[in-house]
């Protein structure tokens, strides 16, 4: 019984070390510099070429493009909602 518990405990410890050890290193390796991606897109390069040069997937290039478009849309919406409405005065209306 004691032997079985020790074996189970060792197995769980090994599995958790492997899971957390590899998870942390791969998560930090998946960072994509969207600023650089968008600079390359602005220079006229194709997504496939950017992905190959930066050693990332084309999906990552398109994801950066979507994020940039969302930021632009949010900025335009915020700017448009901040503008005051045109004032209406009674002097501009004609009376008969």
Image (spheres, rainbow, N blue to C red):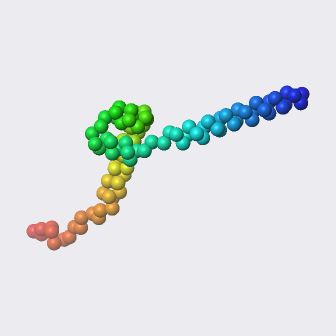
Q: Residue visible at 27% across and 63% down? A: 85
Viewer-proximal residue among 1 and 89: 1
Task: Give percent across and percent down for residue 60.
Answer: 42, 37
Q: Is residue 49 visible?
A: yes
In the image, is residue 64 above or below residue 10? below
Camera-nearest residue between 57 and 90: 57
Q: Which part of the image, by quadrant, shows the C terminus?
A: bottom left
Q: Choose top left, top right, bottom left or bottom right for residue 84.
A: bottom left
In the picture, the quarter occupied by the N terminus is top right
Along the horizontal axis of the image, is 96 left or right of 7? left
Residue plotted at (55% across, 40% down):
27
The picture quadrant where one finds residue 23 is: top right
Please identify the residue farthest to the right as the structure is shown.
1
Q: Position of residue 12 (x, y in %)?
A: 75, 33
Residue 67 visible from this viewpoint: no
Residue at position x 84%, y 31% from top? Answer: 5
């Amino acid at each position: 019984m004691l032997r079985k518990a020790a074996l189970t405990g060792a197995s769980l410890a090994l599995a958790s070390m492997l899971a957390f050890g590899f998870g942390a290193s791969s998560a930090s390796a998946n960072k994509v510099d969207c600023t650089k991606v968008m600079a390359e897109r602005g220079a006229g390069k194709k997504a496939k070429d950017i992905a190959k040069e930066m050693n990332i997937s084309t999906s990552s290039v398109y994801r950066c493009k979507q994020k940039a478009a969302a930021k632009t849309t949010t900025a335009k919406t915020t700017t448009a909602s901040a503008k005051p409405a045109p004032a209406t005065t009674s002097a501009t209306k004609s009376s008969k």
